[in-house]
Image (cartoon, coloured by chain):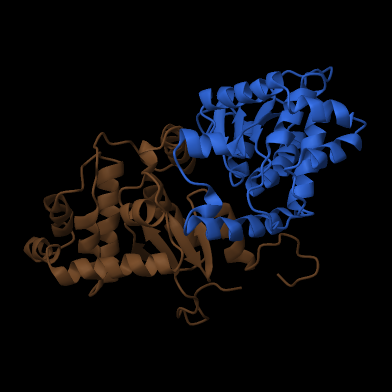
Chain colours: A blue, B brown
Amino acid sequence: MTSGLDSKGRETAAPIDFYFDLISPFGYLGSIMIERLAAKHGRRVAWKPLLLGVTVMNVMGLKPLPKTPLKGPYLRHDATRLAEFFDIPFRYHGHDNINSLAGLRAFVHIAERDAETATELMRRLFAALWTKGRDITPVDVVCNEAVKLGLDADDIREAVQRAEVKQRLHRAVDDAISRGVFGTPFFIVDGEPVWGVDRFWMMEHWLTHHRWRQDTGDQRS
Amino acid sequence: MTSGLDSKGRETAAPIDFYFDLISPFGYLGSIMIERLAAKHGRRVAWKPLLLGVTVMNVMGLKPLPKTPLKGPYLRHDATRLAEFFDIPFRYHGHDNINSLAGLRAFVHIAERDAETATELMRRLFAALWTKGRDITPVDVVCNEAVKLGLDADDIREAVQRAEVKQRLHRAVDDAISRGVFGTPFFIVDGEPVWGVDRFWMMEHWLTHHRWRQDTGDQRS
């Protein structure tokens, strides 16, 4: 079985790729759950940005979930009860048209030098939006969280307007699409794509047994 | 806790409503899983027909899942591995444009007098399509399975063309929509709506504890 670390504590398994967009409540819940699961199995999580506006609307040709009849109200109820079930702080914000571009551009900019700090900034933005109801659209809000991590606000303010940073985010989203990623949370674990905050039971099984069949009769576990 | 039966074996809990459309592989997998779960908790399952063409395309304004880029191929892979995980016989058929109208009209017609036989016919049609790859669109295929249950083929052939039977199916679908049902498998258990074949862990918890919180510290279980 792959613990992710060898006997000297060195990493042996690839990280679990976690595709996120800050605007999704399920992405927020998934961001906390995947780190709990990865920690339990000694695996690392690699956060990767996704723009739901690109995948849902442009590529799949669907409408945003909150604006989809029947499914929208269902998912709103569902996120609330999942948060309760998973024991994760959560409340709906009252903002329309939350935009994650500044946050995700800051992510790719910072991650180039320091992936862990970039990830920590995303955790803070997720929490700002989904526990405090703060609109994370303005770059000022992104900078406000960034300075708490010792980052330079002016550097971020300049970076999110730079063509090269915008390009890097677009390339990241294109890479995601080329791997079949379309929603969030979306995980790729040892090559297996797993979509949804409701699939941790399945990933738990995969991380333990590295196959889908549940019986152990004719296979070594 | 609600076992579904009182000390004399009489039913006390409402059945779990299960909304299905024969054309969905997830509906097929869900039909088997919900009966396993219900049996374990001494609950009855009430099968209720849904037309995905109506909810997905007309009401939600989305395209059929198999024709949705990215999501279509993902879900195809997903149904196969879920069947393996759940140990359910399953294979993809090669038919385009499977239509469940004849099957579901037969269901509402037979269910009026005998819900259990109507349900058994649906189990057979699900298996015909999703294990044997048989196109269940023609009324002859529906009748073929029906006669094995001692039903009268001529009666069914006539019923599926009758305006009153068509109306009954439409009313059933309208009722489903009015309860917020939009996909399959969709369950309503003690008033809680639960969508998806990946939510049995959640329904298991609900059937056992009748709440979403997992801690038992300050509540009687």
The residue under the point 57% across, 65% down is B207
Percent from the top left, x then y, of residue B35? 42, 58
Q: Could one spot residue A163 in this view of the protein?
A: yes
The residue under the point 45% across, 80% down is B10
Between A209 and A182, the one lying in front of the other is A182
Between A63 and B9, the one lying in front of the other is A63
The residue under the point 84% across, 17% down is A8
Which residue ends up furthest to the left in the rendered image?
Answer: B154
Question: In the figure, is residue B161 to the left or right of A104?
Answer: left
Question: In the figure, is residue A67 to the left or right of B106?
Answer: right
Between B31 and B70, the one lying in front of the other is B70
Percent from the top left, x then y, of residue B176? 39, 66
Percent from the top left, x then y, of residue B159? 13, 66
Image vertical order of residue B168 relative to residue B199, above or below: below
Position of the C terminus of chain A by quadrant: top right
Q: Could one spot residue B117 in this view of the protein?
A: no
Percent from the top left, x then y, of residue B206? 60, 63
The residue under the point 45% across, 78% down is B11
